[in-house]
Amino acid sequence: MPPATPTMTETTYEKPTNDELGTDFERVPFSTVSYKLRATANWVKKPYSKRSFWERLATLDLASDKCYVVQPQNPKPPPNLSVWRERLWLTLAIAPALIIQALWYYIIPETNNFHTWHPIVAFIFYHLAFVAFTITLIKHLTYYMDVYGTFDEHNRPRDYVPDKYVPRLVISVLIYTLARTGGGLILGGYDRHSPPSLGHSISWLFPIKIGLWLISLDFFFYTYHRTVHTIPFLWKYHSKHHSTKHPTPLQSILADDIQEIIEILLIPLFASLVMPLSAHEFWIAQCILMYIEGMGHSGVRAFWTHPLVGEVLRPFGMDLTIEDHDLHHRYGKSGKNYGKQTRIFDRIFNTIDERVEGIEK
C-alpha cells in the first residue's frame, strides 16, 4: 500500500510493516505528525444485536465515542489524580472476595463438611471474583478516559481492537484470568484450613511484600521485554501486542501464545522465588497487577502513578505513570520504557523515553 497523498492538513501516512501490524488497514486523518495506519475495526460499526459472541464481549472495553475521534489540543497540564482515592477504590474492589471467604469460615461451623473450601471451590470462586474485578476495573478506567481524555488525542485517538484480533483478545482475557487465579493458589500454597486473616494468611506487612514482589516481577519483565524489542527474530512473538499504537485497557492482555506463557506463568513464578506470597496475598497482588496493566494501556490524560510504590520511587525519577507505557506503544518496536510496574530498570539501564504531556504539576 503506497503512502496516501497529503491532505489540506498536511497529514501523512506511513506504510506499516507486515510483521508489526498485519495487512488490513483503513486511512484515518490526523494532524501533521506521521502515524501508522490503523487496522480495520468494522465490528464496532455493527448494532449490538448484530455483533458476534466475541464482539459483544469485546464491547466491554469500549469507552465513549469521543475517545476514538481526534480532539482539540488541551492547553492545560494533565490533572494530578489522587493516589489515595485510587487506593480506596482498590480496597473496595479487592476486599469483598476475601471478606466473603472469611465470613463463610466464621459462620459455617467447623463440624460442617462444607466449613472449608476445597482448592477447586477456591479456584472457581476467586476466578469469578477476578473476572468481576476486571470488568469493574475496565468501567473505572473508561470513565476516566471519558472525563480526562487521553494522551496524544490531538494527533490520534484510541485504537479499536482490530477485527481479526477480537476473538483472540477475549480468549487471551480468559487464559489470563484462569492462569493468574490458578497460579496464585499454587504458588501461594493455598491451605483450605486457613481463611483470609490479617496477621495469619495475610501479613500485616503485605503492602511491602507485594511491593517487593511487583518490583521483582518488573525486573524479569524488563529483561524479557527489552529482549523481544531488541533481538529482531524475537519481535514476532511480541508484535501482536503492538498491533495498536494507542491502546485501551483490555488490549493490555492481547498477546501471542508464547508471550502469554512468559508473562502469565514464568515471570510471576520467577518473582515468587524472590519474594514468596501466600495465596491470599497473591489475590491482592494479581488484582493490583491487573490494575496497573489496564491503567498503563488506558492512555488516560492524567498524572496517575502506581498506588503501591509510586510515591516511594518518585524522588528517584523511577515511578511509572500512564504516559510512560503509552509512549512505549506509540513508538512500537523502537519504543523504550520497557518496565510495566516501575521505571527502576529503565532508569538504571538508560532506556527511559521522557514524558511529553504527563508532567506532574
Image (spheres, rainbow, N blue to C red):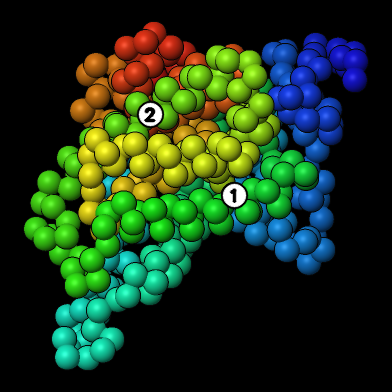
Q: Please report the residue visible at 55 percent of the width from the left and 53 percent of the height from the top.
A: 175
| Residue under pointer 2 | 220
Split into 4 quadrants, where in the image is the N terminus? top right
Circle 1 crowding by C-alpha within 10 Å: few under 14, some 14–19, many from 20? many
Query: Which amino acid type corresponds to the residue marked 1 in the rendered image?
Result: Ser
Which residue is outermost to the top?
350
Rendered location of residue 344, percent (x, y): 31, 20
Secondary structure at badge 2 equals helix
User: Which numbered dot is residue 138?
Assistant: none
Determine whether, in the image, residue 5 is placed left or right of residue 29. Answer: right
Split into 4 quadrants, where in the image is the C terminus? top left
Rendered location of residue 345, percent (x, y): 34, 18
Q: Please report the residue visible at 61 percent of the width from the left and 34 percent of the height from the top.
A: 241
Q: Please report the residue visible at 38 percent of the width from the left and 74 percent of the height from the top.
A: 121
Q: CA distance from mark 1 to mark 2?
A: 21 Å
Determine whether, in the image, residue 326 is placed left or right of residue 182. Answer: right
The mark lying in front, picked from 1 and 2, is 2
Count of residue discs: 2
